Image (spheres, grey):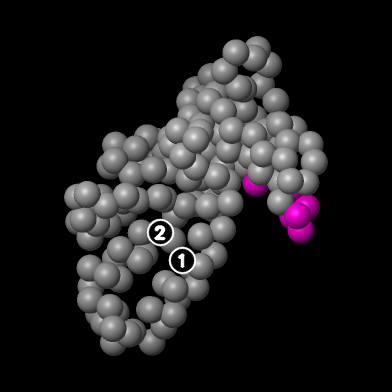
C-alpha cells in the first residue's frame, strides 16, 4: 500500500506517516524510510525503549514524569533481539492527557515534536469528508484522484 501511494506524492514533497498501530512491525518503519518518507509512529505504553548510552530497556513513558515535560533522544525500541529498532523517541505529556505521547521517528531531535501527532486527527476528518459519498472515483468533492491519494497517505496507517 505504501508503494501505491508513492506515485501521488511529488518527488520533492515531505511526507510524515502518522500511525498508532504497527509500530512493532520493524519492516513497516524501514519501508517508510526507504521511500524517503518519515515515520511518526505513536507507541502504546507497553513497549520498551533504551536511550543510547543507557544499559537497561525501560518504559518510554517514564522518561517524562510530569505534565508539560518533554524528552527527545536516540535509542533502541523493543527489548526483543529480533524486533529491535533504532530511532528517535519523542515523548511529551500535555495537559489534559492521562499519559504521555510516545512517538518513534527517523527525524532529528531538533526537527520534531510529539504534538505533531495531533495532525492525525485533522487528517482523518479531512479524509472522511473528502471521501464521504464520493463513490468509486472519489472525485465529486473537488479532489482529483492524485489529491485524494495524497490526502489518504497521511491517514492510511
Residue 42 visible to an observer of this rendering: yes
Q: Is residue 68 left or right of residue 48?
A: right
Q: Does the magenta stretch include residue 97?
A: yes
Instruction: For the residues labelled 1 and 2, say whether their Cβ atoms are less than 8 Å apart.
Output: yes
Q: At 51% from the left edge and 67% from the top edge, which residue is drawn?
A: 122
- Element at label 1: helix
Residue 123 - label: 1
Q: Where is residue 23 in the image (x, y as percent from the top left)?
A: 51, 41
Q: Which residue is drawn at 80% across and 41% down?
A: 66
Frontmost residue, 13 versus 143: 13
How packed mark 2 is, by other alpha carbons closer than 10 Å (few <14, some 14-19, many 20 or more), is many
Q: Earlier in the sequence, mark 1 or mark 2?
A: 1
Q: Residue 154 carries which label?
A: 2
Between 67 and 139, the residue placed more toward the observer is 67
Please name the residue shown 62% across and 27% down the image: 49
Please rate how many residues cluster around mark 1, counting C-alpha atoms within 10 Å: few if below 14, some from 14 to 19, many from 20. some
Task: Give me the disc on residue 143.
Answer: none
On whether residue 102 falls in the magenta region, the answer is: no
38 relative to 55, above or below = below
Q: Give the range drawn in magenta.
A: 95-101
Looking at the figure, which quarter contains the C terminus? bottom left
Q: Classify residue 154 by image quadrant.
A: bottom left
Secondary-structure class at tag 2 = loop
Amino acid at each position: 500500500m505504501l508503494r501505491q501511494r508513492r506515485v501521488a506524492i511529488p518527488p520533492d514533497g515531505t511526507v510524515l506517516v502518522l500511525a498508532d498501530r504497527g509500530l512493532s512491525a520493524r519492516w513497516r518503519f524501514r519501508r517508510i524510510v526507504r521511500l524517503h518518507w518519515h515515520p511518526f509512529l505513536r507507541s502504546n505504553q507497553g513497549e520498551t525503549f533504551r536511550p543510547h548510552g543507557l544499559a537497561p530497556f525501560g518504559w518510554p513513558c517514564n522518561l517524562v514524569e510530569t505534565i508539560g515535560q518533554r524528552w527527545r533522544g536516540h535509542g533502541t525500541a523493543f527489548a526483543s533481539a529480533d524486533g529491535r529498532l533504532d530511532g528517535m523517541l519523542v515523548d511529551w505529556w500535555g495537559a489534559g492527557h492521562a499519559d504521555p505521547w510516545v512517538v518513534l521517528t527517523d527525524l532529528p531531535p531538533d526537527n520534531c515534536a510529539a504534538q505533531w501527532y495531533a495532525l492525525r486527527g485533522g487528517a482523518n476528518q479531512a479524509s472522511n469528508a473528502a471521501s464521504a459519498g464520493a463513490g468509486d472515483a472519489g472525485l465529486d468533492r473537488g479532489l482529483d484522484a492524485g489529491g485524494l491519494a495524497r490526502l489518504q497517505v497521511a491517514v492510511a496507517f
